[in-house]
Image (cartoon, rainbow, N blue to C red):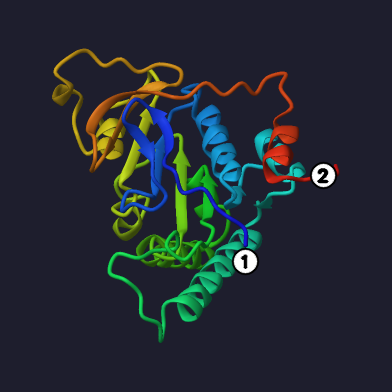
Amino acid sequence: MKKYNYTPIPLYHNVQWNLTSESCHILLLSPTGGGKSYLTAYLLAMAVKRGHTVYFVDAKNSDFGAIVKKAGIKVASTPEEIIDLLKFMVNKMESTYSEHYENRTIDFGANFSSLNLPAHILIFDEVLAGLHAGDKKQKQEMENLLKQIALKGRMAGFIICLTSQYLLSTDLPQSINSQCQTRIVLGSEVSEELFHIATRHYKKDLGTAYKGGVGRGYAVNPQTGLTYFESPKMVLKGYDYTGLLKKLKGDKHD
């Protein structure tokens, strides 16, 4: 039987990505040049290293998405592909509940790690671009499917990590936004509004000057509260990230 690693993924000091906690869902906001791609690359690699299944949405058809796809990770780009991927995840989530939770005696507080099941992690890069890539009906369908994962996915190990360069309070349904309890904002050019949407605090609450920059900013979750944050170092330029992902996945052939 395959063993999966459920150890929290270290991010910065006492800030962790704990896949088995109530703060498993992530919202990562960062204007252009803030270091979002580097942190996303780290999160993806660490999830793969722990043996979990990762899916990637790349609505902008970025170079990073192409690299991830080349490593054998499922990538969705078009509205149709995104909807199909979300449906696949919801159906798999429902079958996980049916198979492992119904008609069984489960200890209080048990989750997918108690059953030695892998996490299924959706990294939805540039979520606003994805939601607006199709027509109004497709956008609504994407939101409805994301809601199901956000609201119901935690116990079965279905986790979302949403990233965006900007976000308004009305851009995401509250039922999705509120479930992202690990929230990170990076960059020097972060507006007061974006900081508040990301952290639910104001810059004046920091008690000191704002210290954001490339790969630097602030994080908040129920365990740490609002705290200064620096992204783990993840080198992409000139590095064989595809090869790294393949190695972490245990692929023996190109």
Residue 52 appears at what percent x and percent y?
57, 52
On residue 84, which mark appears? 1
Please, is residue 193 above or below residue 121 in the view?
above
6 on left or right of 238: left
- The residues bearing labels 1 and 2 have C-alpha atoms spaced at a distance of 29 Å
On residue 252, which mark appears? 2
Tell us which disc is closer to us: 1 or 2: 2
Among the two numbered marks 1 and 2 on one chain, the one whose residue lies closer to the N terminus? 1
Residue 64 appears at what percent x and percent y?
66, 35
88 on left or right of 244: left
Mark 1 element type = helix
Residue 205 appears at what percent x and percent y?
14, 26
Residue 150 appears at what percent x and percent y?
39, 60
- Toward the viewer: 92 or 206? 92
Mark 2 element type = loop
Q: Residue at x 18, y 29 (%)?
A: 202
Q: Residue at x 50, y 70 (%)?
A: 93
Please, is residue 96 above or below residue 206 in the view?
below
Specify the quadrant that holds the C terminus: top right
- Toward the viewer: 148 or 16? 16
Please, is residue 87 above or below residue 19 in the view?
below
Q: Which quadrant of the structure image shows residue 221?
A: top left
Q: Which quadrant of the structure image shows residue 7?
A: top left
Q: Residue at x 69, y 41 (%)?
A: 68
Other-residue count near label 1 (Cα within 10 Å), few / some / many at <14 / 14–19 / ≥20: some
Q: Residue furthest toward the front?
A: 1
On residue 218, which mark appears? none
Specify the quadrant that holds the N terminus: bottom right
